[in-house]
Structures are given as C-alpha cells and as structure tokens.
Amino acid sequence: MQLLNRIIGFTALFVAGCGEPASQTVKTQSGPVQGVTNEGVAIFRGIPYATPPFNYGMLDQIAALQWVQANIEKFGGDANNVTIFGESAGGHSVGQLMASPLARGLFHKAIAQSGTGFQQFQTTDQNNETISGFNAGRSVAAMVDVSGSDEITQLRAMSVEALAEAATDLEISSTFHPQVDGYVLPKPTSQIFALGEQAPVPLMLGSNADEGSVLYYMGLTPVDGSTITGPETVKQWDNLLLNEFGDQANALSIHYAIDGDSDVVKDAEQLMGDSWFGRHAYFMAQRHSTAGHPTFMYFFERRSASPDETIGATHAFEIFPVFGSTLPLWPTDERDEILSNEMQSYWSNFAKAGDPNNDRAPAWQSFSLLQPTEMALRHEKSYSRPVARMDRYEAMNGQLLRREKRALELSE
C-alpha cells in the first residue's frame, strides 16, 4: 500500500498542526492512506547559532521520513512507494526536501501545492534579502536579555510566552524559512533545480488562480524578493514594475489591466499571487522536466458556488477537494463533488504510479519545455491546456535569475 506523507502548511514556519484535522485522508483505490508530519515552532527549530547542524525543522522532517522507511511496513505500507506532499509552507518543504541531499532516497514522488521553496535565498551566515539566520539568533538573544557561553541552553529552556515577542518580530520571523547552510541545503532550492541536482522523482505541482486575494492583505509584498510594499497609485505601480523587472516591465504590465489608481490594489493582489506562487511553480516544472523527470502541473480555479463570492480561488482552497471536504456553511453545488472526485483520483493515482492519469478523470498531459501544459481545474470543468499565464511568468524570469546570481556571488 502506498503512503502519502503530508507536511502540513504553515507548520514549517510557525505552529504545530495549525488547526487542520489530521484525520483527513486522501481516498485511494486500495483504501484511504495518509501520514502526517508536524513541525515544531520555528523560534525553537528555525534559528541557527554558531555551530552546525542548522535547519532543525528540516532535520525533523528528514527524521520522520527515516522513521517511515524503518517502520511503515509494520503498518501495511510500502517503504519503496512513499509520496511527500504539502501546501503553502508544506509545499515549500517539499521543494526543499527535494533539494536536500540528506533526504535522497527517503521518498519516491512529490506533490507541491502552492509552494516550491524557490522564494528563499537566505543563508545562515550572510545577510541576503533578509538578515542572516545567525544574526536573527543574536537578535532573539538580545531581545530576551540572554547572554553568555550557555545562551543556547538558556534560550531552549524558555517558555513560548517568554519568546512570543521575538517570534512575532517581523525582521526575525522573516528568517523562519529553511536557510542555505551548506549541509541540509547546500544551495538555494531554485539553484539546485537549475543545476538538475534535485531528487529525481516524479513531481506534481501547481498554484491557485487567486493566491493573493487574502494573503496580500496579511502583509506580503506584491513581488517576491522585493522590499517595496503595496502600491496605491499608478505611478507607484509603474515604479514597482520598473524597479523589479526592468526591461520586462512593459511586457508584464499588459497582463494587469490598470486604468487608474482605483485598480492598483486589486492588481497588486493578483501580482502577488503570480509572483510568489504561480511563476515559481512554472519554473520548478520547467527545470524538473528539463532534467528528464515526469512533471505534472495544475492550475486551480474553482471559486465558491455563490454568485456573491469575492475571493476567487484563493490560497489553500484546493485542499478541500483533495480531502473531499468543504468549509462549514460554504456554498457548494454539483461541480464541487465532481471536482473533488477528480482531484482525489489524480492525487491517489500519482501516489500509486507517479502519474495522475486514470479512467475516472480527464486526461492530464505532462509538462515539458517544448509543451508547457497544465491541468486547468476550472470553475466549470477540468482539462489540459497550455500554461495560461506563461507570458507573465516568463516576464518575471529575469528577476529570479538576478536573485540567483546574487546568491551565487555571496557564496563564492
């Protein structure tokens, strides 16, 4: 029996469990099966100090996968057929585990939902886009008035309440993602994929049409890797695109219809979703398929069935049909049941065979450099098509390449 080992979203960042019911399962032809990997609180597991190992959160995930290899057959599972999957921070973890040499051979397929790890270039010892992990640790120690040769021991003995202020500090919390440490993560995840050094396993991944409709208002910048916060006027919008995308600014701007200042915030919301999630899924698929590995990309567009809905296919909405559930009191119709059956068949068949295609859902064409396609999980129906937002993703590529180049220069 295949095992789907789920890395719960946001647990790689802040909390253990985050309120998502661990009893949820993905139905498979051989019965429902799922494992759950929870992460520790990042202030305890994500802050490095002067000596390795670092990235304790990732090491916890790797230890969980090692446990699966050693024990899953006792529960009827197949240690040679393990799929890791996660959403949001869990999706980032999937990409980072694929990039880590320490996780090699511990899983055989991967599903990354609205997260890739491609957004992260921070290191343990150098400031790059954020302060370094080591400097974050020093800031935590200073904030809680801890010093001396045993400060690590003192910090680890402190309560959650005592560390709450440090855990919510914006500069410190910006470092809570896994960091390039030369050990767990030898290089940024995107660079490892660019070099073809990631785990050679089948990959299914994707993003949602309206990722930013809620997240944007939680403080994320409209462009991943930028320090420029939300524009409110056409002039600020134009300056943002020019500053981040240079000679591609005009090519990108045609994909966001702005007639006046009143349109800017809504388009910045859309840009945030495309920049943080959509383009990274596209380039991850591009690099993984170019390395010769089976790759299947989706784009989730299902909204609420209510004609009065306002947030579209927002971040994390694809989780519900994957698990055959809905938000309490959320308007649904027949399409939701059909889509859920399709998605559960895709996810379970991919875990079983490394290919989502089955006789219970529309054919899903694999992604390739010459034929970049996606499974459109649309509001009304599902079908394979060319990547709908490819042109805007390609216009953002230069910014990603500049970030990768800067990270490489810092490592030399």
Image: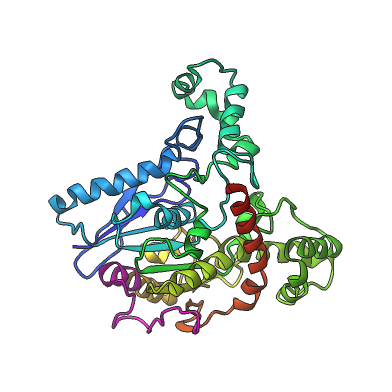
Q: Give the range drawn in magenta.
A: 345-371
Q: Which residue is drawn at 25% across and 69% down?
A: 352
Which SS does the magenta portion mostly show? loop
Q: Which of 392 and 130 is in front in this view?
A: 130
Residue 176: image location, x then y, percent? 53, 41
Would residue 245 appear left or right of 341 to someone viewing this image? right
Q: Which residue is drawn at 34% across and 73% down?
A: 346
Q: How many marks?
A: 0
Asked if residue 115 shows in the view, the reply is: no
Residue 127: image location, x then y, percent? 64, 41
Q: Which of 115 and 246 is in front in this view?
A: 246
Residue 380 in the magenta stretch? The answer is no
Q: Nearer the viewer, residue 274 or 61?
A: 61
Would residue 304 appear left or right of 214 to someone viewing this image? left
Q: Which residue lies furthest to the right in this view?
A: 235
Q: Residue at x 15, y 52 (%)?
A: 75
Asked if residue 240 shows in the view, the reply is: yes
Q: What coloring was used for the rendering? A: rainbow
Q: Is residue 100 above or below residue 132?
A: below
Q: In this view, does 155 lie above or below 216?
A: above
Would residue 351 appear left or right of 148 to someone viewing this image? left
Would residue 10 appear left or right of 254 to someone viewing this image? left
Residue 342: image location, x then y, percent? 36, 75
Q: Which of 27 and 144 is in front in this view?
A: 144
Q: Residue furthest front?
A: 412
Residue 283: image location, x then y, percent? 54, 69
Q: Which residue is drawn at 34% across and 66% down?
A: 201
Q: In which quarter of the image is residue 141?
A: top right
Quarter of the picture holding the N terminus: bottom left
